[in-house]
Image (tube, rainbow, N blue to C red):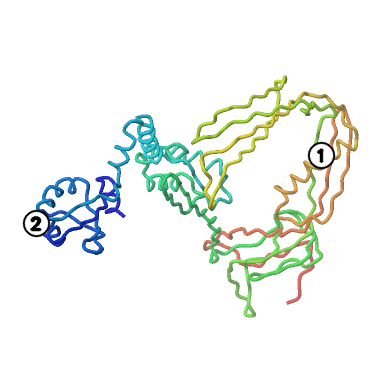
Amino acid sequence: MLLGLLRFIRGYVSFTVSGKYPERFLNITSRNRIRLWNVQRKGDGFDGCMYRADYLKIRKLARGSGVRLRVTAKSGLPSYVVRYKDRVGVMIGACAFLLTVFVMSLFIWSIDITGLDRVSRVEMQEELREQGLYIGAFKPSLDYQRIARNILLENHDVGWMAVNVTGSYASVEIKEEAPAPEVENVYAPCNIKAKSDGVILRIEALEGTTEITEGSGVIEGQLLVSGVMGDEQGTSRLVHAQARVLARTTHEASFSISEKQNRLIPNGETAERQSAELFGLRLPYRFGRVDSPYAAVDLYTDAPAPLGITLPIGVATEKVSALTYEETELDDNSAKELLMKQSQLYELFSLSDCTVEGRETELSHQDGVYTLKVTYTCAEDIAYSELIGTDENTDLTRYVNPTEPEKEQ
C-alpha cells in the first residue's frame, strides 16, 4: 500500500518494448539502476512500468540499442496536474478539501459514554469538559490517561475508566464503584434493642439470650436480645448478640398545601425552532418565538449513527410552548390528590426499609390550608446493636424486665 502511494505521487508510465533485441533494453535499465515492475512478455517484446522521470532519462539510451518504446498509459499525480493545469479552481478546491480533511481529523467530533448507572450522563459530560475532552477538542493536546486518572480521583462513584480514541471518535468506558459494605465488628459484645415502638411478629435470634416473646409489645430502646449468656454452671459470658426482630409499627406524617395555587399552564401558543448541528456548532435556520415570558422547551436531536457511532452532524428541533400563570382554588378531591402524591414520595424515601401494610388518612381544611394526616401500619426490622461497655466492674447478671414474670430455668 505504501509503495503504491509512492508510485502515485511520483507518477509512472506503462509502456511496450519492441525490436530485434529487446533484452538489450533490460541490460540498459539494470546498468542505470532503473526500477521496472509489472514486466510481461508480449510477442517480440514485453510490457512494463517505470517512474515517469526514469522513462524520460532512458528513452534516449533505448534508441541506440535498436528497440522502440511506446507509452500506453500515464498514471499518478503528475498526470492529473498536467491534465487539469488550465483548471486552477479544481486544483485549489482539491487541495483545500484535502487540507480541510486533515485539519478536521485533528479534533474530536463524537463522544460516546457507556457504563453509567448511578452517575448522570450530564454530570459526566461536564467532568470530561473540565478535563478538556469535549466535541471540538484538539486531539494532540489531550492526555487520555490524565483525564481518566483525574476523574477517578475526583468522582468516587467511578471505579474504573478508559478513554479510547479512534480517528475523531472518542469512546469513554466506565465501571462504577460498588458501594463498600458496612463491616460490623462481630467480636465486640453487644445487645440488641428496639429502635421504635411495636408489636413483635417474629424473632430470629442467631446469638444471645432472647428477652421478649412473639406477640408482646415493646417500646423504643427496650432490650430484645441480651449479649449476656449463662450456662448450666451459673457462669456468664459476653457475646455479640445477633438477631432479626420483625415487628408491626406505626408511623405518622402530615402534609400541607394552600387552597390557592398559582401554576403555569400552556395557553395554546406554540412555536418551533430548528438548528443545524455541525461539528459542535449550532446554526439556526428556522426561528420561532412566543409572546410570553414563560415557556416550556422540548429539545429533540436527530443525528445519524451508522454502526452505532453518532456523527457530529444533525438537526436539533426545539418545540416551544407558551405558559401563563393561572390561580386556581383547590377543592377537597384535588387537594387530597396532590397531598397523596407527597405522601407517596414520603413512603419512597422515608419508609423504604419498611413494608407498608395499611394507611389511614385524615384530611382537614383550616384557614385556607389543607392538611393530610397519614398513619402508616408497617412491618419492619426494629433491631439495632448497642455495644456493651466492659471493664473489671461489669455486671454480668442477666437483665430481667420487672414488668414480665421471671422465666423458669
What residue did someone put label 2 on?
31
User: Horizontally, is 409 left or right of 35 in the view?
Assistant: right
Q: Position of residue 351 (x, y in %)?
A: 73, 51
Q: Is residue 353 above or below residue 369?
A: below
The answer to which of 98 and 86 lies nearer the viewer is 86
The residue most toward the bottom is 232
Task: Please give the name of the residue rendered at 42% of the width and 49% of the height, measured from the top-left corner.
Answer: 166
Q: Position of residue 61 (x, y in %)?
A: 11, 50
Q: Earlier in the sequence, mark 2 or mark 1?
A: 2
Mark 2 is surrounded, within 10 Å at the Cα level, by few (under 14), some (14 to 19) or many (20 or more) other residues, namely few
**Answer yes or no: do the residues labelled 2 and 1 have beta carbons within 8 Å?**
no
Quadrant location of the C terminus?
Answer: bottom right
What residue did someone put label 1 on?
339
The answer for how far apart the CA atoms under marks 2 and 1 are is 100 Å
State which quadrant residue 92 falls in.
Answer: top left
Callout 1 secondary element: helix
